[in-house]
Amino acid sequence: MPSNNKIFYEHPLNERVRTFMRLEFLFQQIRYHLQNEDVWDRHAALASLLNIQTVFSRSDLKAEIIKELDRQSKSLSKHQNMPKVDQEHLSSILKEINRIIERLSDIRGQVGQELKENEFLNTVRQRGTLPGCTCDFDTPAYQYWLERPAKECVKDLNKWMSVFEHFEAAVNLSMEIIRESTVPKSVTAETGTYNQNLDPNIPFQMIRIGMPANSPLFPEISGGKHRFSIRFLEFAKSARPIQVEETVHFDLSCCNI
């Protein structure tokens, strides 16, 4: 993701964060398309909504999200009354975590069950698994909905998205805490590669790499909770990327909380 003339490449170090990052990506997609009133934006927004529903149907994400927020809350609480810590900001974050946990805990039943019982959404979901099969002649009901006034469609989408409203807030807050948990440091990759061992006693969640936006290189990251490796490649539009053998300077964050 780009920021301040830099591109940040991120790599999750556990399955929970991997799922959070995918959800964050989908939430950002649908929020972007909901700002516009074009038919294609409504189509893209609904596709993102159905993808979010699919992610939630695969596991007990509610419990996972609450567990992660609770873990982060306990970790942050250790910094209370410590010098050089913005106690007002810390207190605000802890209150927000507790507020979201309470709201998630109040949700009963399977997340998104009402969407599963919506016949219109079921039709679009089933047809959408095949390439191009949500075109007009395949799904006339979907075409009818897409051609409704923009405000009507956006109202429907916001209503369906309200099912995930508190989960969206939870994932966004959790990822913000993870990203801000570590100050990036300047690192050098000799001959275009970098390897680092991780302390298994420290709960690392994610690796972040900052590169200049105008750099012709991008990092390929692999690894888990014990070790990770990075190799830098030169981008090519019509050929296989080539690993460089030159020295590469970049910003590195091993996020942990």
Image (tube, rainbow, N blue to C red):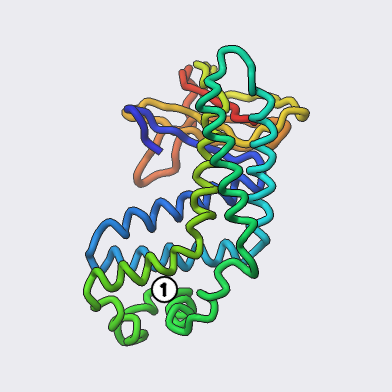
Instruction: Using the image as rendered, state which of residue 19 and residue 68 is in the foreground.
Output: 68
Q: How many marks?
A: 1
Position of 233 relative to 110 (above/below): above
Q: Which residue is most to the right?
A: 201
Residue nearest the viewer, comparing 123 with 10: 123
x and y, in percent, of residue 143 in the image = 29, 81
Instruction: Residue type at mark 1: give it.
Output: Pro
- SS at badge 1: loop
- Residue shown at 48%/57% (left/top)? 165
Instruction: Locate the C terminus and report the quarter of the image it occupies.
Output: top right
Crowding around mark 1 (Cα neighbors within 10 Å: few <14, some 14 to 19, many 20+) is: few
Query: Above or below — where is 126 with respect to 10?
Result: below
x and y percent of residue 196 in the render?
Answer: 65, 24
Q: Quadrant of residue 84?
A: top right
Left or right: 40 as drawn, with respect to 89: left
Does 15 sit above or below residue 149?
A: above
| x and y percentages locating residue 45 in the rendered image | 36, 63
Going by the image, does 199 lie left or right of 188? right
Quadrant of the image for the N terminus?
top left
Q: Which residue is located at x 66 percent, y 29 percent?
A: 77
Q: In this image, 227 relative to 19: left or right?
A: right
- Residue topped by disc 1: 131
